[in-house]
Amino acid sequence: MEIITTIDNIRSKVKEWKLQGLSVGFVPTMGYLHEGHISLVNESNKQCDKTIASIFVNPSQFGPNEDFEAYPRDFDRDCSLLEANGCDIVFYPEKNEIYPENFATYINIISDMPKQLCGKSRPIHFQGVCTVVAKLFNIVTPDKAFFGEKDAQQLAIIKKMVADLNIDVKVVPCPIIREEDGLAKSSRNTYLNKEERIAALILSKSIFLGKSLVEKGERNADIILSAMIEMINSEPMAKIDYVDAVDGLTMLKVKNITGTTLFAMAVNIGKTRLIDNFVVEAK
Ligand code: AMP
């Protein structure tokens, strides 16, 4: 596996591959990798001839009081994991390579989409995500890009950006990977101490409760949300940021499950903000 740090070098490598007729899959990450990330690499390997993963903790998607500095990093371990899982190149740019001095162009989706769910408490988050992902797409020019459904709002927003800006990449959604006990895998799980790790199970438990109500035929989103919220509030260490049911495309709140509905939550366990979700496709 090759480690590439500059835009010029990654561009010439991809050009070489494309001249050989090889397809390129891309997995953007912020590193501190786990099986969730690796599932995206595996899917890319299945669908494409070559796989590039990027590791870049993107400063522009963190608010002033968020965990940019503290975000966990372990580049050597990440490289071992990527290499062992058949990744061909890791793109590992420095901050200045992506945001040189006087950088001034940002991508914003002008709709309610990025203002809902996580956007309420993280107002600049999706502007940062769209900007870095658009830049990475322009740099890597992949045929396909693989994103986790764990970050459902991010996935919907990136699909919208790709469609609106006619970016020539196919966005491939990949399912949420969980720990054996149900907790969605996340680089931020490492922040949790022993008690918090146990308390964090309340997220997936309430996800499974919501899903089971839907499976029993409940279509009233408020009834499902109330049951989920009651369960989360039964855990003293959990503090809800939001638990909402929204339209899968617009991210606007829904009262009843009629089309594709996303049930999504962000919950603070101690100082750690965790997210989880499930999607219902109405028949
Ligand atoms: P991150 O490093 O957190 O920015 O995540 C990089 C990519 O991995 C994103 O597309 C995430 O949605 C995806 N991802 C993170 N955690 C999981 C998970 N538990 N299951 C599936 N995909 C995930």
Image (cartoon, rainbow, N blue to C red):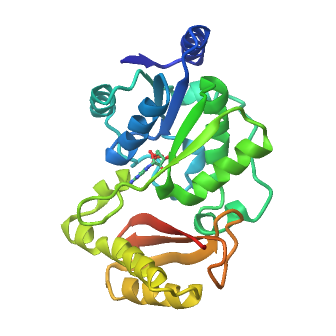
Q: Looking at the figure, which quarter contains the C terminus?
A: bottom right
Q: Is residue 138 left or right of 192 when viewed as pictured?
A: right
Residue 228 placement: quadrant: bottom left
Q: Looking at the figure, which quarter contains the N terminus?
A: top left
Residue 78 placement: quadrant: top left
User: Is 157 placed above or below 267 here?
Assistant: above
* Residue farthest toward the front in the current orientation of the protein: 283
- Give the image location of residue 57, x and y in percent: 48, 40
Q: Is residue 127 visible?
A: no
User: Is 2 placed above or below 204 here?
Assistant: above
User: Is 166 placed above or below 218 here?
Assistant: above
- Residue at the image point whose x is 52% and y is 59% from the top: 65
Number of dots carrying numbers: 0
User: Is 147 placed above or below 50 here?
Assistant: below
- Give the image location of residue 111, x and y in percent: 79, 61
- Give the image location of residue 77, x and y in percent: 27, 33
Q: Is residue 211 left or right of 270 when viewed as pictured?
A: right
- Residue at the image point whose x is 57% and y is 15% from the top: 14
Q: Nearer the viewer, residue 9 or 59?
A: 9
Residue 182 placement: quadrant: bottom left
Q: Nearer the viewer, residue 164 or 138?
A: 164
- Residue at the image point whose x is 69% and y is 65% from the top: 115
Q: Is residue 28 visible?
A: yes
- Residue at the image point whose x is 34% and y is 30% from the top: 82
- Give the image location of residue 94, x and y in percent: 50, 26
Q: Nearer the viewer, residue 237 or 79?
A: 79
